[in-house]
Amino acid sequence: MIPAPLKARAAVHNGESSSLDIRTIDVAAPGPGSVLVRLGASGVCGSDRHVLDGDWQLPSPTVMGHEGAGTVAAIGEGVVDVAVGDHVILSWFYPCRRCTACVSGRSYVCTGSRAEECLLPDGTSALSENGTRVFPYLAVGSMSEYTVVPESGAIKVPAAVPFDVASLIGCSIATGYGAVVNDAAVQAGQSAVVVGTGGVGLSIIMALNLVGANPIIAVDLSEEKLAAARELGATHTLQPGNDLAAQIQEITGGGADFAFEAIGRVQTIESLPGLITGGGKAVIVGLPPQDAPVSIDALELAESGKSLIGSNYGSTVPGRDFPRLAELYLAGKLPVDKLISDRIKLDEVNEAFDAMRRGERARSVIVFD
Ligand code: APR
Ligand code: ZN
């Protein structure tokens, strides 16, 4: 067993700067119900960028990263779901397992989780620096060599799944797959538009391809992203522009059955109802900045029987969906590796965020030694 407390190199956000410091933090031994994880990989996700760019307020200092996978290095008292040596994917919304939502199978709207406070269930953090508390982002903090998470936030998956792939299953893949399967319930032969094809949008396209949606129309500013979208199953790729709705109407014969927004921009969210046919579903997957309301033509929405739904983390139930996604990957049905454009070191994380701000790279993944 790895002795804890121990030291770990980690990417720390001080609450103000939009770049991260690579520093050595202290990691305490896991307390009751918690698990010490040695990270194998961490994705660099758009939600981390929101935090760095000040779109969302968080406690600080924070170890960033919420899309991670690794090996269980030690377990706290009472932990039964995982054992030392297990490979786990981390969930950024650990369920409390006791609230009404959790016991009725809807842990994605758990009311007892303290994940959004970046705290373990007992209100503590196992991370610190010179005696000062450091918060793991969304109770994950995967941009660190080690972290401590609640047992309910570490899901065992087969060791045959490489860590870089497993890390993406923990956020972008689960979000995209869940938006398509759990929330929109897309059926074979139905048409779909995906606006924004970064890591999350490309994951939506992969899931649309898996369930047999057709046509699958990808919309992005970047030709590099559109090429990746074609590779993952998009049948049509478009640059956004004035005639986007008309082009989609022409391809689909009157509007798509589904439109997904995977950027988190107010204007593109507002454009969604105009891309779908009567009775269609518009799905908000991208998360906009705080306090940025959108405006919708409610009369048009009601008269044409359209729905606008929110999808957070694809309504993922981690203990059900992570193993399922891992098996789909192992069966060759979900080519998660095609999403990984860059494998980087922890020290290169700021360059990865800069590339993301320029609209470059499908997904950068930090790989730990
Ligand atoms: N029209 C079309 N595409 C755009 C536009 C636009 N106006 N503006 C940006 N994009 C594209 C970018 O080119 C990029 O490919 O949106 C994509 C965003 O992808 P990423 O930056 O890689 O972000 P991602 O990790 O996919 O997250 C997207 O989902 O979960 C949320 O918080 C997350 O809000 C974020 C969103
Ligand atoms: Zn994410």
Image (cartoon, grey):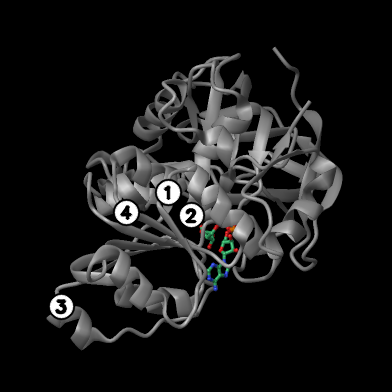
| Apparent side of residue 217 relative to residue 302 in the rendered image (left or right) | right
> How many tags in the picture?
4
Ligand 1: image quarter: bottom right
Per the model, the C-alpha gap separating discs 2 and 1 is 6 Å
Image quadrant in which you'd find residue 72: top right
**Which numbered tag is attached to residue 215?**
4
Label 4 or label 3, whichever lies nearer to me, is 4
Image position, residue 170 (x, y; %): 51, 39
Mark 2 and mark 1 in contact? Answer it, CB < 8 Å: yes
Image position, residue 126 (x, y; %): 67, 39
Residue 316 in view in this figure: no
Mark 4 and mark 3 in contact? Answer it, CB < 8 Å: no
Amino acid carrying mark 3 in the image: Ser
Image position, residue 237 (x, y; %): 47, 59
Q: Nearer the viewer, residue 34 or 359?
A: 359
Q: Residues within 10 Å of mark 3 (few under 14, many from 20)?
A: some
Disc 1 marks which residue? 205
Q: Earlier in the sequence, mark 3 or mark 1?
A: 1
Q: Residues within 10 Å of mark 2 (few under 14, many from 20)?
A: many
Q: Earlier in the sequence, mark 3 or mark 2?
A: 2
**Which numbered tag is attached to residue 26?**
none
Per the model, the C-alpha gap separating discs 3 and 2 is 26 Å
Q: Residues within 10 Å of mark 1 (few under 14, many from 20)?
A: many
Rendered residue at 29%/71% (across/down): 249
Query: Any atom of ligand 1 within 8 Å of the CB at mark 2?
Result: yes
Amino acid carrying mark 1 in the image: Ile
Per the model, the C-alpha gap separating discs 4 and 3 is 22 Å
Question: Relative to 307, does residue 151 appear above or below in the rendering?
Answer: above
| Apparent side of residue 268 relative to residue 310 in the rendered image (left or right) | right
Per the model, the C-alpha gap separating discs 4 and 2 is 15 Å
Question: Relative to 116, does residue 38 appear above or below in the rendering?
Answer: above
> Which quarter of the figure is the N terminus placed in?
top right
